[in-house]
Image (tube, grey):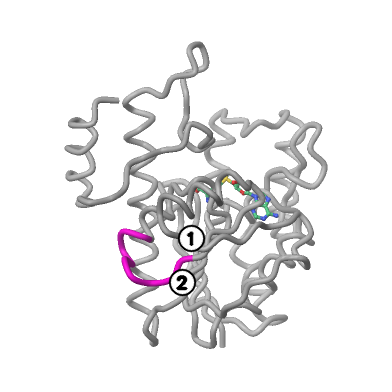
């Protein structure tokens, strides 16, 4: 895409100075199927998602009692949001964590992040710091209940007291999109089961085809409240579809 046009768009988002370099391996930049080339609209959407994440992160910043020194982005991917964190927090220490090694390396090289390679076994993931702020965009959205529990536990154990976790999740807006025909890569009968489980028990999950242990989840607010009684955290805010008018955002404080 033409750089001048892109910079004009970045300015319209009030994100002047944001690093706009995108890795060829970044799966979050949608590409035209026929030619595998991202369209202008794909670029615009990518950076709108960065901006929308930052709006939620700024809300957390307002609610935080302490200064922010250490930040974690997990899963960082290739830095769709981490570039925004670096823009908003130019001097703070930001950790990039993902199972995608190329993504973590890209974040270290381009956004001065500290690398932590993740694992599908979350018990193996270790951080050398306690974080004041954790951003988790679109990970619990792919986990079953056991993995989701382990992920929340990992975050709470690695948050400083009074620190805030900003986590995205699929809720009612995603269900509406499913009812309107979006499949999210799942078969129709699996979608029905997923939605049924969400309404019956507050948590629905289905593996993607040929991908045991990684799929799509739907999580009700009540599930996070239930978890808050088992771990030392408090749900500060539940923001419906607050990330890109799509995923819900939950602000969680360690107590
Ligand atoms: C939908 S992408 C979101 C990436 C990024 N947050 C963004 O918004 O651009 C999901 C990411 O989760 C990562 N992932 C999957 N399992 C993981 C795990 N156990 N630990 C850390 N990252 C994981 C994938 O490699 C992928 O980069």
Residue depicted at 52% across the width and 16% down the height: 33
Q: Residue furthest front?
A: 109
Q: Position of residue 129 (x, y in %)?
A: 57, 78
Residue 170 shown left or right of residue 226 in the figure = left
Up/down of 146 relative to 193, above or below? below
Cα–Cα gap, marks 2 and 1: 8 Å
Q: Earlier in the sequence, mark 2 or mark 1?
A: 2
Residue 154 shown left or right of residue 71 in the figure = right
Disc 1: which residue: 249
Whether residue 158 appears in this view of the structure is yes
Query: Which sits in the foreground, 67 or 12?
Result: 67
Q: Position of residue 142 (x, y in %)?
A: 67, 48
Residue depicted at 72% across the width and 38% down the height: 192
Whether the residue under disc 1 has CB within 8 Å of ligand 1:
no
Residue depicted at 52% across the width and 65% down the height: 95
Q: Secondary structure at mark 1?
A: strand
Residue 127 in which image quadrant:
bottom right
**Do callouts 2 and 1 mark residues in contact (Cβ within 8 Å)?**
yes
Q: Quadrant of the C terminus?
A: bottom right
**Is 81 colored magenta in this rendering?**
no
Identify the magenta region: 86-94
**Is 93 colored magenta in this rendering?**
yes
Q: Position of residue 145 (x, y in %)?
A: 76, 59
Residue 239 shown left or right of residue 199 in the figure = left
Q: Residue furthest top?
A: 34
Query: Which sits in the foreground, 35 or 213?
Result: 35
Disc 2: which residue: 237
């Amino acid at each position: 895409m033409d750089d001048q046009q892109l910079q004009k768009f970045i300015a319209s988002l009030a994100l002047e100075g944001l690093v706009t370099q995108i890795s060829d391996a970044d799966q979050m930049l949608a590409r035209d199927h026929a030619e595998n080339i991202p369209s202008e609209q794909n670029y615009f959407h990518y950076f709108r998602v960065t901006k929308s994440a930052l709006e939620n992160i700024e809300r957390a910043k307002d609610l935080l009692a302490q200064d922010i020194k250490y930040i974690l982005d997990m899963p960082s991917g290739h830095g769709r949001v981490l570039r925004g964190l670096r823009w908003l927090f130019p001097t703070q220490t930001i950790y990039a964590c993902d199972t995608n090694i190329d993504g973590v390396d890209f974040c270290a090289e381009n956004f001065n992040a500290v690398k932590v390679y993740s694992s599908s076994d979350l018990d193996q993931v270790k951080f050398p710091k306690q974080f004041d702020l954790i951003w988790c965009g679109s990970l619990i959205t792919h986990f079953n209940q056991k993995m989701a529990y382990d992920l929340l536990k990992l975050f709470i154990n690695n948050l400083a007291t009074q620190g805030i976790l900003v986590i995205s999740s699929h809720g009612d807006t995603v269900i509406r999109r499913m009812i309107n025909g979006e499949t999210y890569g799942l078969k129709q009968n699996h979608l029905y089961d997923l939605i049924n489980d969400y309404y019956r028990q507050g948590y629905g999950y289905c593996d993607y085809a040929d991908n045991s242990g990684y799929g799509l989840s739907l999580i009700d607010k009540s599930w996070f409240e239930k978890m808050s009684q088992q771990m030392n955290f408090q749900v500060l805010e539940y923001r419906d579809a607050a990330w890109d008018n799509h995923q819900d955002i939950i602000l969680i404080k360690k107590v």
